[in-house]
Amino acid sequence: MATSNPVLRYAESRKNLTGCACGLVGVGLTLTGAAGALWPLVVAGLYAAGALIAPPERPDAPAFPGTDEQLESLRADHATLREYLAEVELPEPARELLDALDALFEALLEPGWVSDPDHLHVLARAVRQDVPEAVDAFVRTRWWSRVNPGSEPPERHLERQLTALREEAGRIAAELQEAEELRQRAHTRYLEDRGT
């Protein structure tokens, strides 16, 4: 375990431990009489040699969350997004698109499906950024369009955004389906070849 005290950090270091092991060899030589009267120099020299040949300290690699942890966090964020979307008043066509997108997210976020980091990134961006931003922009723009009528209806933009997000998530689902079909065909081929 790393410590912030420099003395303790050196005491736990590879250099010190290797030096101590070599110094113990020097003590062993002294006890056998091989070091003679210069035994302090032999012990110190062997310690120094051990400390010099020891591999350098390297910092521990950072521990980032794994795919399972990221997926679990994303599932929790998806639940939070659902709560937000349940409170927002949307026109029926946009609500239908959003419900279809939400059902696709729910299926993709089930454990065991998405393991590719790129797919996980796309889903995380959609759940945490794209959908909330699209709905929030719609709500804000709708308010202004009531005050200043005559501009393009904000519903159109929301529907286009949700359609684009549905297509993006649909591509992930298609890739997963293709991978499962390949796996199934490979297993069929394996079983058929095994029988011959």
Image (cartoon, grey):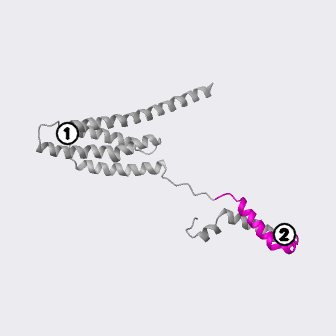
Asked if the magenta segment contains residue 85, the reply would be no
Question: Overall secondary structure of the magenta stretch?
Answer: helix
Task: Indicate which disc residue 87 carries.
Answer: none
Instruction: Give neighbour class at mark 2: few <14, some 14-19, many 20+ (Cα, 10 Å).
Output: some
Instruction: Tell me the quarter of the picture where residue 40 sits.
Output: bottom right
Residue 79 vertical position relative to residue 54 in the rendered view, above or below: above
- Check disc 1 and give the amino acid type: Pro
From the image, which quarter does the N terminus lie in? Answer: bottom right
Residue at screen point 26% across, 35% down = 160
Number of marks in the rendered image: 2
Q: Is residue 92 above or below residue 52?
A: above
Per the rendered image, the range of residues in magenta is 30-56
Could you tell me residue 150's position as x and y percent? Answer: 12, 37
Q: Quadrant of residue 171?
A: top left
Residues 153 and 54: in front is 54
Seen at 43% across and 48% down, the residue is 71
Identity, as a three-letter code, of the amino acid under mark 2:
Leu
Give percent across and percent down for residue 44: 76, 70
The residues bearing labels 1 and 2 have C-alpha atoms spaced at a distance of 87 Å
- Pick the quarter of the image with the C terminus: top right
Which class describes the residues within 10 Å of circle 1: few (<14), some (14-19), or many (20+)? some
In this picture, is 75 found above or below 100? below
- Residue 34 lies in the magenta stretch: yes
| Residue designated by label 1 | 154
| Observer-nearest of 190 and 52 | 52
> Label 1's element?
helix
Q: Is residue 126 visible?
A: yes
Residue that numbered label 2 is attached to: 29
Which quarter of the figure has residue 56? bottom right
